[in-house]
Image (cartoon, rainbow, N blue to C red):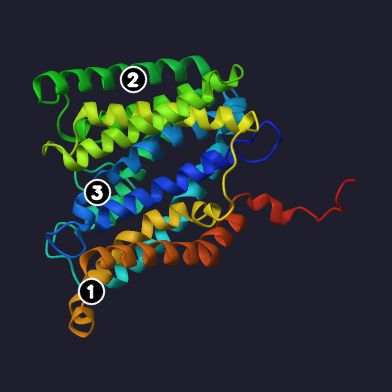
Amino acid sequence: MATPKAAGGGKLRGVEAGRGIAAVLVVLVHATYISGNSPAFDGLFKFGRAGVDFFFVLSGFIIYLAHASDLGRPNRVITYAWRRFVRIYPTYWLVMAGFGVILIFYPERDPSVTSWGNIVASVLLLPRYQDPILKPAWTLRHEMLFYLLFAGLILNRSAGRIVLAIWAGFLLWQIGVFTITLHPWFTGMAGYLPFRVFNLEFFFGMGVAVLLSRGKARAPGWFLGFGAALFLGNGLMESFGSVGPVEWPPHQLLYGVASAMALYGAVGLERAGQLRVPGWLFVIVSASYSIYLSHMILLMTIQHFLPRLRGLVPLPPDLVFLLAVAICVIAGVAFSRLVEQPLLRALRDPLRARRPARAAAP
């Protein structure tokens, strides 16, 4: 995913850091029950799935800011499509291939998971009323839908705005009906993908990008602090409050609004030179996509061998949780550095390889 530039021309390190934190949050929630029915740290990190909400807000922000100059320029849509393809598919296909090898030796209990229809839909990230074989990839289907509709802005700015406005209107209608009646208006595939509440978070991110493109952020410190507190407070309420639906619009909307506020504040502070992000965090940041894609495979592998390990060394659940998270992060970083990043450099702009090398300009 392309990263917008700071005022001085460098990358927005706060945005990059947020992406790494969001990936680790998702790992935390999926590792919470690795020891069985007893959640690690009393279920503190059950809200970690909200890392997905931040991802969607961040994606809307980055895509709009990175391609704002392409809007209404249809000749740029091929480059846009190629960059979106390169960022999503090659790394995903490699991880999927590795998971496929595992499934040969340890097949899924549900044969519909590995049916030909689901295999094709999973590999191509096509709409299907069933989770992909690699379960975290469900978010990539939403990303691809957003990329497709955003391309309308590049082909024709006015028509693209109308399409996005209609999409946002239907999303708000779906959320309103679901919140009031507890029954969604759109069901089936429509409710599962195009009109799912998460899609509204892309608009939050685009809204932040539009506001920041119009001038200096106002009270960025307040927005960052309040947004982070709202995100964490909503998360703690989800982790320790009464049990409710896994997806309930008020929860997702609060996460989305909080993420947008924190993002607005972080970018504003960084552009003003008032935000410093520690360098060590970028070891995780650069590998966020690899960590996100691979962590479920690693957790399943750890869970498979955990009974044998416990037969040799007694390990408390919280320690198992911490070790599992560390393994997922370290392995994701290694995969990113050895595979993902070289692959992206080779594919990001294939025309560069054909251009003759030139001396650096003074």
Say which residue appears at 81% left-offset and 56% top-offset. 357
Mark 1 or mark 3: name the one nearer the start of the chain.
Answer: 3
Q: Quadrant of residue 105?
A: bottom left
Secondary structure state at the residue bearing disc 2: helix
Say which residue appears at 39% left-offset and 21% top-offset. 164
Residue 182 appears left or right of 214: left
Label 1 amino acid? Leu
Count neighbours of disc 1 (C-alpha within 10 A) and say few if under 14, some if 14 to 19, many if 20 or more.
Answer: some
Secondary structure state at the residue bearing disc 1: loop
Label 3 amino acid? Leu
The numbered mark at residue 44 is: 3
Of circles 2 and 1, the one toward us is: 1
Residue 326 in sight: yes
Say which residue appears at 45% left-offset and 36% top-offset. 59
- Pointers 2 and 1 in contact (CB under 8 A)? no
Mark 3 or mark 2: name the one nearer the start of the chain.
Answer: 3
Residue 166 appears left or right of 72: left
Secondary structure state at the residue bearing disc 3: helix
Q: Is residue 313 above or below residue 111?
A: below
Say which residue appears at 21% left-offset and 73% top-offset. 304
